Image (spheres, rainbow, N blue to C red):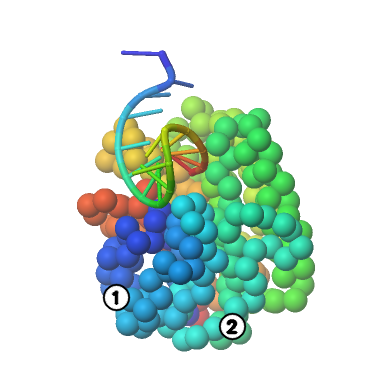
Amino acid sequence: MKIATWNVNSLRVRLAHLLDWLAAHEPDAMCLQETKCDDEKFPREELLAAGYCSVHHGQRGYNGVAILSRRAGTLACRGIPGFTDPQSRVIALDLDGVRLVSVYVPNGQSVGSEKFAYKLCWLEALRGWLAAELAQHPRLAVLGDFNVAPEPRDVHDPQAWEGQVLFSAAERAALDSIVGLGLTDAFRLFAQPEASYSWWDYRMAAFRRNLGLRIDHVLLSRELAQRCVGCTIDVAPRRLDRPSDHAPVIATID
DNA sequence: ATGGTAGAAACTCTA
């Protein structure tokens, strides 16, 4: 089973990139973030024509998460159950015995801001829910844009980024606590190139200079981690014209 | 020197 995640930063703008990528890599499932459209404008038919079913938790203008799959799955939920959130950031799908979760963690804007407080609150709600999910679903995969770089090696300039949003102690502790429930960062199961990142700011020619952060993750329950045989970041789409600022991450599970 | 770019939307917010 090949599963992937990609923050597309507007699905309608990136649809051609996405369709090309799906045709080239043929993942069984693809988790999307920042679709930035409501359900009515979701390109369901175009994706179906490309061989993918979809479930979407949309929102006009901002956020929006989806899961595409070759075979039809069963929608598990939209949003974190019991956590009232006007922002569309979570969707879950049961597919061939695996529970897949697509997450778009709040960015947090800047440490100490209201949005930062919302981010920490949101991560705590996610942790509580995933604890219950893990108890019920031994095959659980949580994929998405976590907006947190876990370690110094996930940041191009860790000294400059230390304490900044996306790499503050509080955010790292919150992500660590989620991983500590019994999840594995699939990317770190394997040897990886130095300076591997999944997001580069559009500004300052950051991609050309590889000034990136690894903030998009595939977290696997123990059972899935044991069967994971590969996990890579595909930087190729970041080189295209009008790219998303994120690259897809793909994991293969036997 | 808080700059720079991109997307959605509507003239500003979010990232």
Give the residue displayed 72% in from the left and 46% down from the top.
A121
| Residue A50 x/y as whole percent | 32, 80
B6 to A41, vertically: above or below: above
Of discs 1 and 2, which sits in the foreground?
A: 2
Q: For mark 2, what is the residue?
A: A74
**Picture disc at residue A23:** 1
Question: Quick one: A77 or A130, which is closer to the camera?
Answer: A77
Q: Earlier in the sequence, mark 1 or mark 2?
A: 1
Q: Amino acid at mark 1?
A: Ala
Which chain's residue wears label 2?
A: A
Give the residue displayed 27% in from the left and 65% down from the top.
A16
Q: Is residue A11 left or right of residue A88?
A: left
Give the residue displayed 69% in from the left and 76% down from the top.
A138
Give the residue displayed 66% in from the left and 35% down from the top.
A114
Q: Are marks 1 and 2 on the same chain?
A: yes
Question: Quick one: A86 or A106, which is closer to the camera?
Answer: A86
Q: Amino acid at mark 2?
A: Thr
Provide the secondary structure element on which disc 2 rests. strand
Quarter of the rendering containing residue A227: bottom right
Provide the secondary structure element on which disc 1 rests. helix
| Residue A179 x/y as whole percent | 66, 57
A15 to B7, vertically: above or below: below
Mark yes or no: residue A236 visible.
Answer: yes
Q: CA distance from mark 1 to mark 2?
A: 23 Å
Q: How many marks?
A: 2
Mark yes or no: residue A189 visible.
Answer: no
Q: Residues within 10 Å of mark 1 (few under 14, many from 20)?
A: few
| Residue A200 x/y as whole percent | 38, 43
Which chain's residue wears label 1?
A: A
